[in-house]
Image (cartoon, coloured by chain):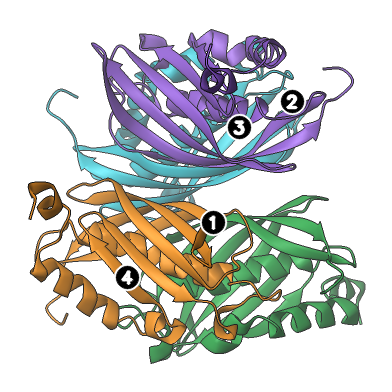
Chain colours: A orange, B green, C cyan, D purple
């Protein structure tokens, strides 16, 4: 394995921490979203298009698009956080650029600026049809690192 | 009926237009959200807390909170749009102020500045427990009025 | 003096702390902006219209509008911070609703949600002509309370 | 000249249109900002650090940073607009990532998604000291293309 590849991978502990947190998000399961990539400072979440996630015209609802974008950014930050911490979204802003139509949508959260307290992420959502990706939403998000509560 | 009350009510046509658009949003049904108030320039959407809409700590997921906030603002704008038009979210920004815990959450979308092309809304989300309301999210949203497509 | 009025006033120490920080902002002086009201959790800043603050059509530049909005929100938060702290803007979002034309513009920053670490403010900017106020911009801002550095 | 280079250049008409609009922005002159690069869909604006643009700690004020970021994004969009149109900022959101200290700050506005009515830009601001660039702010902006008014 090359050094470069190594640095692009999270440790098994981080992967497990992210996946188990994701699995506790009832909303992600209910929407049908899946974690499809976990790298240091970058996470992908995929959501298949289906009637349960549409808006009034049959496209994927901005709310579903935003939900996976928010989670992708949150977990991207979380990959860089120390043990015994938790991540909370402070705020985000998202522009809906085009109707989200396709076989599925994919959200990519990427850390722009890591920090001890606050982390800023870039959010992108692509609609994918027959392997072609089209950018349908772009956003910017602020997250905070907080101590993990005893009950978590 | 007093004049003031009259002006605070939408026409039956507008109410029907908003409700039928909402009913076509697969996501809102799937989440369990309901339109609970439709006034000129102001719409409320309520979402009961249940495991299907949670994040990893059991609170209502920011994605669900945002989804109903986005829809509430969109329909608030839509109440003021002419016939044969449709509403699209251009962008929104939301601050998550506190964990969304309670019996249900309620999103209130309010038109701040109506316009022929663009409308700006204020978004608020409250968590409600035993009748007590607590502000858990606040946002700002830009919407665009577009001609209705023939197939809608 | 009534109790209510008392609680609407900042202490002389807070007023002095806000004013002296404002006076050190070279940009505010250079633009011609003035602090016109300091209340607990609310600050007003006024900027006279003059050629030095315009955009290409002669209105007040969105950058000038935003600059005073950002400072108004920052100082609104600062009125609620403990001694020996400083305020930094984490981020803000602003919608420009109408051309900023008039005798002067007035920014009002209001704390929506105070916090030990993060504070969220509402931002409003009004254009004023012959005493008539028109809302020309509205925004939302996140601020962080940090320890004051020894050299400040 | 290679084909690639040609496509990276704006026409003399566009360059003149952007520069003359910039020159009419009293605020940019007053701050000391200069247009330093005009490409199709991308514009740079540079602002030397000097006491007139500082906040209370001697860094470049977020308001000045935002002002040049807003103008850079606006003119980036404007390079792609047809003749006889004008550009207005609908809204923007900016995260201040680090203190803006250095010899000068440079804002880069880049079109992410052009459109007939609305255009979305990415905004970046770098602080530059001795040739080293550090990202100090990042933002996202929505602009609208409007018909040019007869008096412009």
Disc 2 designates what residue? Answer: C102
Instruction: Find residue B106 and report its image quarter.
Output: bottom right
Note whether B39 is above or below D21 in the view shown. Answer: below
Instruction: Find residue B152 and report its image quarter.
Output: bottom right
Secondary element at image label 4 = strand
Q: Nearer the viewer, residue A39 or B29?
A: A39
Q: Give the class, few, some or many, for how many residues have Cα within 10 Å of label 1's Cα (few <14, many ≥20).
A: some
Does the rendering let one see residue C35?
Answer: no
Q: Give the class, few, some or many, for how many residues have Cα within 10 Å of label 2's Cα (few <14, many ≥20).
A: many
- Disc 3/disc 1 C-alpha distance (Å): 42 Å
Question: Which one is closest to the eye, mark 2 or mark 1?
Answer: 1
Q: Residue at x 55, y 79 (%)?
A: A53
Does the rendering let one see residue D27?
Answer: yes
Q: Are marks 3 and 1 in contact (CB under 8 Å)?
A: no
Secondary element at image label 3 = strand
- Disc 4/disc 1 C-alpha distance (Å): 18 Å
Disc 1 designates what residue? Answer: A134
Same chain shared by disc 2 and disc 4 = no
Same chain shared by disc 3 and disc 2 = yes
């Amino acid at each position: 394995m090359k050094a470069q590849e190594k640095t692009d991978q999270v440790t098994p502990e981080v992967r497990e921490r992210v996946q188990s947190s994701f699995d506790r998000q009832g909303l992600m399961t209910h929407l049908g979203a899946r974690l499809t990539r976990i790298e240091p400072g970058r996470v992908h979440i995929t959501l298949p298009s289906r009637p349960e996630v549409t808006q009034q015209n049959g496209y994927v609802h901005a709310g579903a698009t935003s939900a996976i974008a928010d989670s992708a950014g949150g977990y991207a930050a979380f990959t860089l956080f120390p043990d015994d911490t938790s991540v909370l979204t402070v705020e985000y802003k998202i522009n809906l650029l085009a109707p989200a139509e396709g076989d599925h949508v994919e959200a990519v959260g990427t850390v722009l600026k890591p920090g001890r307290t606050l982390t800023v992420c870039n959010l992108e959502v692509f609609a994918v049809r027959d392997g072609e990706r089209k950018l349908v939403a772009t956003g910017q998000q602020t997250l905070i690192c907080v101590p993990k509560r005893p009950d978590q």
